[in-house]
Amino acid sequence: MSSINSGFGFNSTASDVSAGIDFTGKRVVITGGASGIGIETARAFAAIGAEVTLAVRNLDAAATVVADLRAGTGNDNIHLARLDLANMATIADFAHQWRGPLDVLVNNAGIMALPALERTSEGWEMQFATNHLGHFALAQALHPALTEAGNARVVSLSSSGHLFSPVLFDDPHFNFIPYDPFVAYGQSKTAAALFAVGLTRRWANDGITSNAVMPGAIATKLQRHTGGLRTPVERRKTPQQGAATTLYVATAPALEGIGGRYFEDVNEAPLVDHRGPDYTGVAPYALDSAHAERLWDLTLELLSEQQA
């Protein structure tokens, strides 16, 4: 299986990689689309004609973002819907209200390195719940809409943070293991990559594929618990550059029918056998098919217990 080289790179922007792409008539959902790189992701999709729905927790705060995006792109088909990934009821409500096909689901929202252990009402560790379980539940609930679209894509935002930890299958919620903010974040972002592997294996026959992306180091509210972005200046990206890999994975004709891979700097990332000083590449455990199967089963078990 050959590695995918797009011809783009570190400095490419979302508008660079989507130039010449026509998404008129396509429908896109972006979680957390009203902040950080989510805004630039939404802007890029709107600029190529897509109907874009921003799935957010705070509708009032996001209303200004929608108005700005409509004015800046000339695309009035930009909408808001409430979604809290740590609240299963809002996920069910969002999916219940959705009508018609869905061409692209961008699992963009996330939280990072909570300084102290926080849990959802179900007792789930908050980062694993928000970054993985919520997105998994959303994709499952929207499966009929994705199937209806045909050739649908799910973009799963991972991170170089996955290099800090595999999924802790025996204790993902830190009931026994001492809580560490970056280990918890790391396992949630490994889970994002494994979700892309498992989804593609199960849903490719329905015309649905998924790839994981590492957007890069971008100064956003994501780092509010870490004291700000600490990546060397030469390794930092603008939000427009940070959205580039997402746009490529979601729109590139070359990726039709291809899933279960991990991209960074708009190219497929190489496998690495250790965490290097530049935090590039993808750990083998984040793409391991057996791990993907185990995670899928674990996630279904957790979600079914919550519904019981």
Image (cartoon, rainbow, N blue to C red):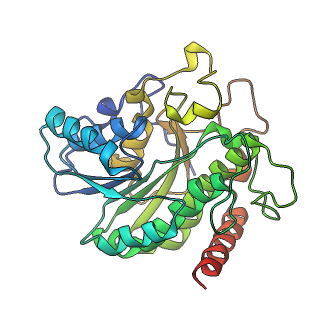
Residue 162: image location, x then y, percent? 68, 44
247 or 51, nearer to the observer: 51
State left or right for residue 191 relative to residue 24: right
108 or 255, nearer to the observer: 108
Q: Is residue 214 above or below residue 129?
A: above
**Residue at the spot x=64%, y=21% of the render?**
230
Q: Is residue 6 above or below residue 133?
A: above
Q: Quadrant of the C terminus?
A: bottom right
Can residue 14 be seen at all in this image of the molecule? yes
Residue 73: image location, x then y, percent? 17, 36
Q: Residue furthest bottom?
A: 308
**Residue at the spot x=50%, y=27% of the render?**
218
Residue 157: image location, x then y, percent? 52, 47
**Residue at the spot x=62%, y=75% of the render?**
300
Q: Residue furthest top?
A: 233
Q: Is residue 53 above or below residue 186?
A: below
